[in-house]
Image: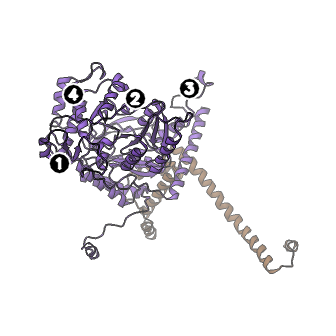
């Protein structure tokens, strides 16, 4: 593996009109200093908080992970215990033959072999998941924007098979799609360029990036992504999951150490395992745990030989999608510099969704994006397309162009999708001449704050940071999970509930994804339904319920203010 | 059995809006002999029992089995406590009162006298 020497290079690009107060300067200044939206790119390495006044370290709200009262945990385990007992009873009936087994079974000749369907995962799927399966994979028949149409389906044999009744439930409010900036839309004006580019380039590429599939539109996209993020260079891939799993093996290998957060996504874990490096896990967002691991790693080196590690890579995510918590970026950067490690930041959910102009967690914390070694993100969530990118120094991206599995073996991205990403990024940056992008970013952060504060007031337990648009609402008990989802659908609101394999067994939750396309009326309707349902089902477990809003004409308040 | 009619109510609970949820209004409805609200409240309590024990996800015949078992155990507990607890309490009281009052007397004399 070649050694990666990092040398700063200027980003050469056209001068677009950008939003922000310094529009005039960007057209006049030449040479090494380009002012873009408050980022000052110079030859010297920028330190966090030093030198340029644009890098104001921002105060970060605290993540909340409130614990439920003890009786809730007891009831949760009791509920699971009872349903598992019934699961064993039904398995016994199926084994004896009193009941027909709807699931796949081994053939008669294979009964003496190692059993295929006896592990806990299959048991759970047969006996717990199947009973409430109608809450997932609901068929929809419209665009998944802020509202959508759900097809009604019923089951005659307790969720083993479904049939569609033919009716459609219309205008269901969509609280589950990752539609943070509302780009999942069907507006003819916005999509004109996409239609033009499709006519020009076609739909399929039929080749990999390294052979015949490197189109000029791909290069345009990568330059635009690098400019959007404020880094030197970027590369785009066709699939977000594959961006992680196929590029981490290209960056690290045997003899390297990966320090990965407890709650990292499966794609990161898969990429780490495929690379062959040693993996150590630190507690979620816990800097003491990370520092301990770093110290140990540097002091003792590799496991048996005690040689130094070739590379230490810290893998974290911008927003964790199941918890809604933000990464502690300034602390991690400080640790990284102290112990000379590299940082891989996966901004799948946070790009476009946090930060005053939608540039992600680096902007949210006021940190120079060039300090993060590998910036990764996806176009699936905030940009309404598919695919992922990796951005960073030019040497890194050039290396990945020749050594990444995706570049060599995977088909290139399809031109309409690329054009959709280009138009979405241009909209957010304001390059297309409107303020629509910035309006959406602001609307998203307003909606997030409104929803989170109202839910906390009502007394629900909400996890995560106050600025993250992912809002998990804890339900805990297995019975309430199914009841909650069905009742919300009856009230014409579509929610996503998550249970055991994706979350710890005692912490089942409903996850809301706020969108910039949600209007205040939609959020009010959702909040009102949640209020009623929370009382009816009894999921308002929070013990820190803040006091009711004070009356407007309370004299003592005025005295304090003046 | 009781369960069969209750099962038909379950799906209604998921969408009923004006359900009686506070104990205070339930107590008021009992006082006023308001049968409809009372029945709704009892139905809501049964719904909570289904949710908390996790029985809500099971098929109706499994719910019947569980309810039968639970009812049987509760009935046995009530029977045992009704029949045997007074006897045990009386014996215990006699034992301790003899200990306190008649120190020289032996326990053998106490038992022979009964």
Callout 3 touching callout 2 (CB < 8 Å) = no
Callout 2 touching callout 4 (CB < 8 Å) = no
Same chain letter for marks 4 and 3: yes
**The N terminus of chain A lies in quadrant:** top left
| Mark 3 or 2, closer to the camera | 2
Name the secondary structure under disc 2: helix
Residue furthest to the bottom: B101
**Colour displayed for chain A in the image of the structure:** purple
* Residue A130 rendering spot, x and y as whole percentages: 47, 38
Give the alpha-carbon distance from disc 3 to disc 2, as whole Å. Answer: 40 Å
Callout 1 touching callout 2 (CB < 8 Å) = no
Q: Mark 3 lies on which chain?
A: A
Between discs 1 and 2, the one toward the N terminus: 1
| Residue corresponding to mark 1 | A20
| Residue corresponding to mark 4 | A217
Question: Residue A106: which numbered mark, if any?
Answer: 3
Q: Mark 2 lies on which chain?
A: A
| Residue corresponding to mark 2 | A250
Between discs 3 and 2, the one toward the N terminus: 3
Same chain letter for marks 2 and 4: yes
* Residue A469 rendering spot, x and y as whole percentages: 32, 48
| Mark 4 or 1, closer to the camera | 1
């Amino acid at each position: 593996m070649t050694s990666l020497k990092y040398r700063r290079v200027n980003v050469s690009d056209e001068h677009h009109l950008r939003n922000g107060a310094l529009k005039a300067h960007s057209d006049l200044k030449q040479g090494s200093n380009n002012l873009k939206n408050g980022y000052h790119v110079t030859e010297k390495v920028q330190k966090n908080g030093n030198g340029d006044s644009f890098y104001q370290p921002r105060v970060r709200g605290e993540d909340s992970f409130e614990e439920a009262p003890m009786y809730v945990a007891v009831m949760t385990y009791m509920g699971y215990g009872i349903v598992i007992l019934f699961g064993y009873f039904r398995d016994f009936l199926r084994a004896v033959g009193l009941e027909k087994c709807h699931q796949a079974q081994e053939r008669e000749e294979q009964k003496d072999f190692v059993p295929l369907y006896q592990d806990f995962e299959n048991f759970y799927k047969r006996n717990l998941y199947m009973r409430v399966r109608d809450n997932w994979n609901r068929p929809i028949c419209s665009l998944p924007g802020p509202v959508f149409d759900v097809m009604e389906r019923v089951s005659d044999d307790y969720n083993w098979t479904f049939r569609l009744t033919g009716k459609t439930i219309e205008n269901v409010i969509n609280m589950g799609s990752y539609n943070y900036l509302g780009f999942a839309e069907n507006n003819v004006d916005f999509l004109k360029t996409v239609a033009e580019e499709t006519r020009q380039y076609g739909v399929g590429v039929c080749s990999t990036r390294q052979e015949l599939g490197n189109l000029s539109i791909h290069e345009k996209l990568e330059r635009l992504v690098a400019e959007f993020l404020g880094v030197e260079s970027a590369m785009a891939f066709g699939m977000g999951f594959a961006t992680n799993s196929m590029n981490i093996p290209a960056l690290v290998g045997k003899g390297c150490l990966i320090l990965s957060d407890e709650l990292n996504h499966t794609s990161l874990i898969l990429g780490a395992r495929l690379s062959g490096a040693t993996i150590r896990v630190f507690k979620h967002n816990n800097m003491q745990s990370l520092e301990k691991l770093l110290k140990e790693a540097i002091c003792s080196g590799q496991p048996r030989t005690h040689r130094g590690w070739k590379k230490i890579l810290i893998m974290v995510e911008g927003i964790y999608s199941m918890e809604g918590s933000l990464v502690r970026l300034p602390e991690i950067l400080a640790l990284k510099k102290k112990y000379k490690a590299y940082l891989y930041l996966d901004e799948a959910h946070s790009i476009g969704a946090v930060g005053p102009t939608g540039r992600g967690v680096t902007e949210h914390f006021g940190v120079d994006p060039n300090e993060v070694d590998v910036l990764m993100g996806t176009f699936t969530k905030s940009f309404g397309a598919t695919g992922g990118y990796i951005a960073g120094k030019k040497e890194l991206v050039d290396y990945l162009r020749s050594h990444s599995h995706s570049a060599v073996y995977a088909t290139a991205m399809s031109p309409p999708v690329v054009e959709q990403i280009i138009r979405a990024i241009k909209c957010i940056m304001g390059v297309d001449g409107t303020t629509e992008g910035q309006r959406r970013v602001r609307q998203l952060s307003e909606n997030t704050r409104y929803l989170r504060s109202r839910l906390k007031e009502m007394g629900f337990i909400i996890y995560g940071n106050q600025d993250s648009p992912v809002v998990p609402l804890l339900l805990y008990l297995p019975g309430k999970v199914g009841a909650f989802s069905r009742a919300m659908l009856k009230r014409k609101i579509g929610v996503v509930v998550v249970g055991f394999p994706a979350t710890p067994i005692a912490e089942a939750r409903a996850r809301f994804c706020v969108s910039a396309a949600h209007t205040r009326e939609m959020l009010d309707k959702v909040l009102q339904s949640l209020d009623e349902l929370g009382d009816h089902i009894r999921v308002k477990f929070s013990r820190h319920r803040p006091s009711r809003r004070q009356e407007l004409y309370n004299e003592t308040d005025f005295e304090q203010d003046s | 059995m009781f369960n069969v009619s209750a099962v038909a109510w379950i799906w209604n609970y998921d969408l009923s809006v004006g359900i009686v949820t506070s104990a205070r209004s339930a107590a008021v409805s009992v006082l006023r002999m308001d049968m409809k609200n009372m029945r709704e409240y009892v139905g809501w309590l049964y719904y909570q029992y289904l949710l908390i024990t996790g029985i809500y996800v099971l098929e109706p015949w499994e719910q019947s089995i569980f309810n039968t078992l639970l009812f049987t155990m509760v009935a046995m507990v009530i029977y045992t406590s009704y029949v045997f607890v007074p006897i045990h309490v009386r014996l215990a009281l006699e034992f301790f009162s003899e200990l306190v009052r008649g120190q020289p007397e032996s326990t053998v004399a106490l038992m022979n006298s009964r």
